[in-house]
Image: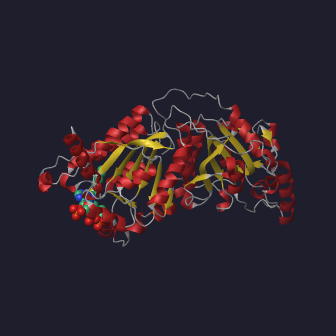
Amino acid sequence: MKDHIEALEAKRSESQLGGGQARIDAQHAKGKLTARERIELLLDHDSFEEFDAFVTHRAVDFGMQDNLPMGDGVVTGWGTINGRMVYVFSQDFTVFGGSLSETHAQKICKIMDMAIQNGAPVIGINDSGGARIQEGVASLAGYADVFQRNIMASGVVPQISLIMGPCAGGAVYSPAMTDFIFMVRDTSYMFVTGPDVVKTVTNEVVTAEELGGATTHTKKSGVVDGAFDNDVEAIAECRRLFDFLPLNNREKAPTRPFFDDVKRVEDSLDTLIPVNANTPYDMKELIHKLADEGDFYEIQADYAGNILIGFIRLEGQTVGVVANQPMVLAGVLDIDSSRKAARFVRFCDAFEIPILTLVDVPGFLPGTSQEYGGVIKHGAKLLFAYGEATVPKVTVITRKAYGGAYDVMASKHLRGDFNYAWPTAEIAVMGAKGAVEIIYRGRSPEEIVELTKEYEDRFANPFVAASKGFVDEVIMPRSTRRRVCRAFASLRGKQQQNPWKKHDNIPL
Ligand code: HXC
């Protein structure tokens, strides 16, 4: 028996060494952790249970039959994060550059199948040279098998991708279909075709970092949800995000102990809105003042800053926040902000996370670049997402709610459950000056000033909407936390079903 145990231990040690010490050292020299070190940091201490540590590839070409590292370039299994179960795979760059073989893909598929069956999220750590070149089409098939599982898992269990090395070619499409993607600055990149191909095809000269680095994807493309300075920080933030999420679409997000007063009054909110309606203010201040302990987990902070998305807790329960940000482009809705918020609203709805919407929106951004870029379809995504969502929806209009954007931002007409307005709210078809210039075309500038004042007095307030029941109550800014908490508390038993359909046809 002793011999057997020693043999097992020896095999395990060999498997744990991946591609060997020299390659581990090379990985460290690049400022990267190994696949196993990343799992160690991600999961609770001693909670990792590994699958398939002894799996080897089946390739026989190019002398591969003589090179059979155990585990085949990916570490897979399950463990816990703050006591809650999660499946994980972590590609091992020290084994054939973390490239994906047929068996590597099978290992990933195995834990994804279990995650879907058992209702626990999947976190994928990507660090790979792409398709295992020696395996050809078997590797491509393996990718497609993973893609299919990403699709089946979508909306069933949360999926998170950490990009911690190369991720190129078709390989990017697996993370792209997951719910959240984090990258590490300077050591990771994602692109469909690399700089060399780009130069050959388009003559553009671009570095890998410029083409698909963390900054590019968090600021320009919006593909990625967060960028961090190193592996440790990215993993710590992933743990924080995980805590906000439910394990699957049949369970609610966890309720955490909270140390904040539900009735907390914030007098400073009474003066948050500037006297001049065109002066910006920071909507984040309101979010922080509403949240338990002021904690706001922002997603896509560097992209389409005119809308804010992220998670807070109210009475210990996760709430998704969507808020116009007057500090950026006056909080206008445009292509990027509509897409950003729409995907977030759909995530929240898929996983039964209630949505708080804070509105200060002057409308949709005008202009040829927006129209040519398809703002009609992109704006419709957000409209559609709100309208189909059946989770509890609470809306607070702080200032402007103009035009179609009023309808879009979780209005009463899109089945908003509680639609509050501050006394400073202006709910109208458009701003007073623009409206008057259209209705009273040709009048003198002095008359326009006077008529604008009249229009403002008549319409730039919440009471016209309130008189029609489109606003449920005009509330004191200082008591917003209490009102919103009570609203969500009253909605805990909400049940709403959409008509049966195979699936909808959201304007993609
Ligand atoms: C097999 C690979 C590999 C691959 C790297 N390696 N990529 N082995 N298949 N795709 C191996 C190398 O041979 C090397 O082995 C080790 O991994 C480390 O690679 P290096 O090149 O030394 O590392 P580095 O300098 O850091 O460069 C990393 C890299 C480069 C940028 C990823 O290796 C690279 O360009 N690889 C090829 C990428 C590629 O073209 N992949 C196919 C893309 S097409 P040794 O033994 O020396 O340590 C694709 C399609 C997917 O992925 C389609 C899905 C639908």
Q: Please, which colouring scheme is shown?
A: secondary structure
Which of the pair 298/22 is nearer the observer?
A: 22
Q: Nearer the viewer, residue 405 or 224?
A: 224
Instruction: Write the residue at 56% across / 29% down.
Output: 498
- Do we see residue 334 in this rendering? yes
Whether residue 475 sits left or right of residue 151 in the image: it is: right
- Left or right, 40 with reference to 347: left
Q: Is residue 31 above or below residue 222?
A: below
Relative placement, left or right, of 271 versus 115 is: right
Quarter in which the N terminus is drawn: top left
Tell me the quadrant of ligand 1.
bottom left
- Does residue 291 show up? no
Task: Find residue 479 and report its horizontal and vertical position in percent.
Answer: 80, 45
Quadrant of residue 368 within the rendered picture = bottom right
- Most foreground residue, 266 or 88: 88
Report how many numbered discs are placed on residues in the image: 0
- Report x, y in % for residue 404: 66, 47
Compared with 370, 464 (above or below) is above
Can you name the residue that lies furthest to the front here? 2
| Residue at 58% over, 39% down | 353
Q: Quadrant of residue 185?
A: bottom left
User: Residue 60 location in percent, x, y?
Assistant: 13, 50
The x and y percentages for residue 177 are 42, 47
Which residue occupies 60% across, 59% down?
305
